[in-house]
Image (tube, grey):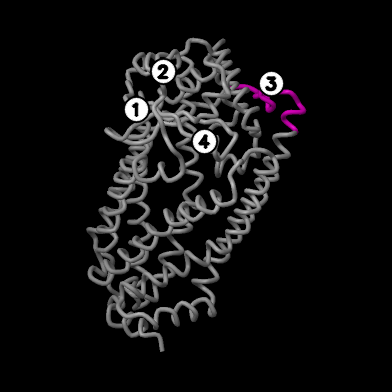
Amino acid sequence: MDGSAATARTVSARPGRAVPGGLLALTAVVVVALVVAAVLLVPWTAAPAGPVDASAGLDPAAVADAERLVTRLRVPSLLALAATTLAAVGLVASGPGRRALARARSRVPGTALQVAVTALLVCVGVELVRLPFAVWSEQVRLAEGLSVRPAAVFARDLAQGWLLETVPTVLAVVVVVLLARRLPRWWPAVAAAAGAVFVVVASLVWPVVVEGRFASFTELPDGPLRVDVERLASEAGAPVSDVLVSDASTRTTTLNAYVSGLGPTRRLVLQDTLVDGFGQDDVRAVVAHEVSHAASEDLVRGTTLGALGVAAGVLVLGTGAVAWSSRRGTSVGSPAAAGAVVLVVLLAPVVAGPAEALVSRQVERAADAGAVALTGDPGAYADMIRTLTLANRSDPSPPGVLQWWFGSHPTPAERVATAEALAG
């Protein structure tokens, strides 16, 4: 018999035990704080009024090519999401899955190790299901000329990405289960605080710890572009000391730039594909967008909302789990519950996707407006969006449902329309 079943009985909450009133109050306060922060911090800007040209003014042949390519990539992506969700649910909720996890737990001593093994096995199972879809997607990118990664680099990137997802997931599950054993009624409060702290720390150390695993960086050399970048940053009121160029061309032909980090770790990164593939005017427009993010402290805004969002989510789900445990006489503080906790951790980002995408689109729309104000040339900015869309072979107007759920930026067509409206 699975030893964790006996453990579950010894640590279970007494049937009928109510959720502490203090926990309910804390949950309400954090949820309200999240809503208030979203209202006050997010630059809620309306989408362009009137009809939007779905082609963004691009040649119909280019639009058709982009739609064909995006469809080829979208199929393995959506199938992977469905397959991994089913795999996670099957491992955790089905009889065979539960028995397999119980057998694995029975072979290791100690609650913490049993929880870690359970969480790790679910993560491994999910990743094995995802793997063929990842390979499929990479093959499409290679065939279409979007990826230039050798197989060994692709495998290394895949392995590193899996570790970056799995290690925090396993640790989070272990922490939640152990907290629930020691604090059967109050563990959601401690777990929420820990989750919020993790978001802040991750934002701070991401450039230093993570980004270097997937790219090499050098300082943007002195010259006209460096002068232009520093002038734009100064005009925006967001001077940057670190302006780096990443060796993206070793992996991809797509073009991009971004700002990452907080405080001392904040930096502006230009991909070498962007620096080498765009003229200086277009690079300047891209940089203006990123500098606008920095000037508006969008990373601080995002980290604040992310920390509150994680805390609110943990409190809401945790309070529900405490109430369920009180009625059922069970406990989250059992190795047998670890699989369910993993399932929640894995599915939470998918469920929260529409809300996160909505906030991101609003922030990106504001950054577009800020970039137009910085450059003073809405027409040139709209042309840059078109050029970037062509270079990356992006769908200028993706399907509404997918854009609503996954779209982190306004569509290229909307961005062009916004810039042109500012010109008017």
Task: Tell me the residue that label 3 is attached to.
Answer: 57
The reply to whether the C-beta atoms of the residues labelled 2 and 3 are less than 8 Å apart is no
Up/down of 250 relative to 161, above or below? above
**Is residue 54 highlighted in magenta?**
yes
Where residue 80 is drawn, which disc sits there?
none
For the residues marked 4 and 2, what is the alpha-carbon distance in whole angstroms? 19 Å
Inter-mark Cα distance, 4 to 3: 28 Å
Q: CA distance from mark 2 to mark 3?
A: 31 Å
Quadrant occupied by the N terminus: bottom left
Residue in view at x 46 percent, y 28 percent: 270
- Side of 218 relative to 50 (left or right): left
Secondary element type, mark 4? helix
Q: Which residues are magenta?
A: 49-64
Instruction: Residue 315 in the image: state x and y as whole percent.
Output: 32, 56
The label shown at residue 242 is 1
First along the sequence among labels 4 and 2: 2
Q: Earlier in the sequence, mark 4 or mark 3?
A: 3
Residue placed under numbered mark 4 in the picture? 248
Three-letter code, disc 3: Gly
Q: Secondary structure at mark 2?
A: helix
Quadrant of the frame with the C terminus? top right
Residue located at (62% from left, 56% from top): 133
Q: Which residue is mark 2?
A: 226
The amino acid on which the numbered mark 2 sits, given as a three-letter code, is: Arg
Q: Residue at x 72, y 30 (%)?
A: 63
